Amino acid sequence: MRRYVAGRLLQAAIVILLVTTVTFVLVHLAPGDPIAVALERPGVTESVRQQWRAEFGLDRPIAEQYVRWLGNAARGELGFSFSFRRPVRDVIADALPRTVLLVGLALVLSFAVGIVAAVLQSERPDGPRDRWIGRVLLVLYSMPDFWLALVVLLVFAYRVPLFPPSGIVDPVLHDYLPPGGRALDRLRHLVLPVSTLTLLSTAAIARYQRSALVEVMPSDWMRTALAKGLSWRRAVRRHALRNALLPSITLAGLYLPALAAGSLFVEKVFSWPGMGLVTANAIGARDYPLVTAGVLVTSVAVALGSLVADLAAAIADPRIRVR
Amino acid sequence: MRHTLRRARHRAACWPIAAYAALALAGCTDVRQPAGQQTAGPADVGGTMVVATPAEPTTMLPALQGTIIEKEITDLLFDRLADIGNDLNTVGDKGFVPQLAERWDWGPDSTWIAFHLNPKARWHDGVPVRASDVRYSVQLIKDPTFGSPALPLVTNIDSVSVRDSLTAVAYFHRHTPEQFYDLVYQVSIVPEHVLHNTPPAQLKTAEVARRGIGSGRFRLVHWEPGKRIELVADTANYRGRAKLDRIVYTPTPDFNTAVTRLFSGDADFFEQLRPENLARLSGDTARRAVAYSSLQYAYVAFNTTDPAHRGLPHPIFGDRAVRRALTMAVDRRAMLHNVFDTLGLALYGPFPRAMPVADTTLPQLPYDTVRARAVLDSAGWIAGTDGIRVKNGRRLEFSLTSPVSSAARHQYAVLLQNALRRVGASVKIDEVDFGGFLAKQSGRTFDAELALYGTDPSVSGFKQSWSTAGVGPDGSNFPSYSNPTVDALLDSATTTFDPARTRAYARRAFETIIEDAPGIWLYEPPTIAGIHRRIHTTPMRADAYWAGMADWWIPASERTARDRIGLRPTP
């Protein structure tokens, strides 16, 4: 097992190196540069921009910039963000926890709702309830995330203004609220983005989970459990779900990187300053160090996510356990 | 033809009226009509304004600001020696309003000006503002290691000396009409005692550049990147405390979200409403629209040099006759109406209306497709089998670069493509992201581009955009347009001390440029802010709508929960 994990970690390191290298090269090849965007105001002369480029080493050959970046990254130094004029490490330290909170909550809810929906569907496959839930899930599955986010925003923040439209907390009142009020304020700001992400992820989870449940339902051991007098729900909880968890475990592994990468559109629409929004803005601003660091964090999460998923699957299913 | 032109001129005169009538119908206020303006009473001090802003600043040091949002916030935090007046005059010191300098004396030969500082002026940390701060501010901007974007604008300032603690004397290389403007408009005064321990070359990345300790009527109390920037009234300010208690800037990068925040009451102010948002304001009892002037104008810039072979004329736009023909092929009024309905303002040349030397009576190239075709024929561009003209084996085909983020320019690109197709020109729309657009613009690697340019109010600023001196990489003459007559006229305009003659020279320069058609003058973008009705504004200056923000107020009777926080320190 240790050898397997070590091997996977080595593979992950190679993949991360490749991904960040390709990102570094691509973002440098894109037209424009961070200084042109940072000093975009009319009247700023090209010679001033050129001076800034020289100071930040952006006038050096791309290979030299890459070697320097790699050396710094190996020491944990991710560079200086041009679009924030702060160390990249600080920018990510601010954004990452916000994304983990948003996406983490959404994932927990997605799996909870998705599995419950799958259970309800699998009770009578192709029955009216299965068909209706399936239709709703299909609609949700087909929705573009930015569109759903905008609809949720317009409906619940503007037409029926139940929740705040954006941000993490109330920009004015939050600091003046009592502790309970602050917690409530934070929760209210979480409702719309978390709901949107939950709706978007639930459909896929439910569909995979339903298929797995429908597959295990006719099994002999399920028939035996029901024959012993277990209620249907108890039999599902104790036996069927455990045997049908593999798709959810695999999906959880696939979704884990989102904890680090964030959701670009949902974060943008709800002005949630997490990794998705920060990275997207960094791409627009040609903020090379921040884009590369964002990709680095995401690729680490992808590698770890798939490793965790494989290990969890192996634990859950002895048939695929590594010898 | 004369009838058509007269009708066009009549319509031009009516357009702004129609636009403001539309605004009025939508429940909007036009701040350019000050009649009946209310003023704040002594009880009307207090309240909070939440601003939804599309971008976030990266520095709080005015000499390093490179974006509009950075200018806006640093302008609120830092004072100048004097501020430009509402008429935006840049010649001499007429109309300038004292800020840190309560008065100034000109030297006998006008190559120096002594500024007498207000003895009551204090930095936000309580330290008095002194003449040495003025000297340091100028030295900092002029320090080549500092890399201030404003450096090229202060080249006429030689130095500043300290006569006494409250008198700073600025010396200039030459006596010029805009020397006063060059110093007071381009240089915000920064605190020497806060910054001097950090070498200028390191200030770009230094934490001290984020502290925002200025002498303005607002001071910075919080800056949480991505979340909010909170300014509060400096209650002991020498110019009087700001009427609002607090302004909170909240970055909202998505346009639709910003609009929703405004309409849901989450934000009080958003400066970039689009015409299509105005319908929502009709019947809205909580919000209103405020139209204000700006110094922006949009035009099609024809690159007169060949992007593939720098130094050679562009194979299409190097020919003045072709540029004129393409301009005449475009029905600019119909396009303006199509894109902005009644809210667009026609552009009459390379200048916005708010520029002091603007002249909207200048003769225009007419919309005349028959003449456009004839001119192209005589220039040797003959229609091919597919309708696209050809000359010496080259098709009349070019790319029109536009930033993908601009909805208005996207619409214009499509309309222009159709209009020019009708006279035998093939336009390929090249939509790129903002970074790519800037790269093409500064590298002059486009054929034609839909440029939106924000000029400064001075003629010397205009010169950077349209004289031969602005053709190089340091200028903003994106079409690389060059005409010695225009150069001479602009030289004269920037060296005369008589404002009337400045206008006359500028008018002749504009006329020549319009005749040469280095671009198609399209529109001034409608600048319409959405604002909560409880917030009362003062007239907004075209170069900086925020200039009077410290005098905006919320009547005591109209305050909401967020207004009643007062100036308590944040727990």
Image (tube, grey):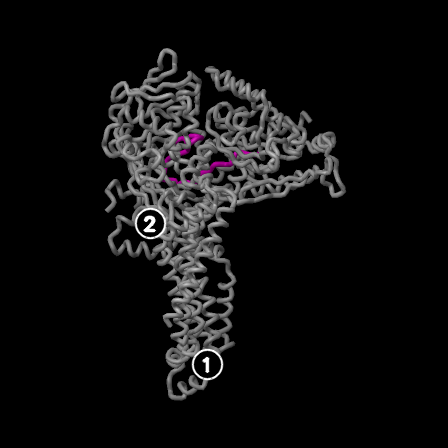
Mark 1: amino acid: Met
Q: Disc 2 or 1, which lies upstream in sequence?
A: 2
* Residue mark closest to the camera, 2 vs 1: 1
Chain identity of mark 1: A
Say if A75 sits above or below A257 in the image: above
Q: Which residue matches tag 1? A: A217
Query: Where does residue B128 sit, x and y in percent of width and height?
Result: 24, 28
* Residue at image location 69% in from the left, 32% down from the top: B372
* Residue at image location 58% in from the left, 38% down from the top: B446
Q: Residues within 10 Å of mark 1 (few under 14, many from 20)?
A: many
Q: Is residue B534 magenta?
A: yes
Label 2: element kind: loop
Query: Where does residue B327 sit, x and y in percent of width and height?
Result: 64, 32
Mark 2: amino acid: Asp
Q: Is residue A175 visible?
A: yes
Query: Where does residue B368 sit, x and y in percent of width and height?
Result: 68, 31
Q: Is residue B557 visible?
A: no
Task: Specify the farthest residue to the right.
Answer: B385
| Magenta residue span | B522-545
Q: Is residue A246 magenta?
A: no
Asked whether B517 or B570 is in front, the reply is B517
Q: Residues within 10 Å of mark 2 (few under 14, many from 20)?
A: some
Q: Which residue matches tag 2? A: A170
Say if B205 sits above or below A204 in the image: above
Label 1: element kind: loop
Q: On the rendered structure, is B25 left or right of B164? A: right
* Residue at image location 24% in from the left, 26% down from the top: B120
Q: Quadrant of residue B99?
A: top left
Chain identity of mark 2: A
Query: Where does residue B89 sit, x and y in percent of width and height?
Result: 44, 22
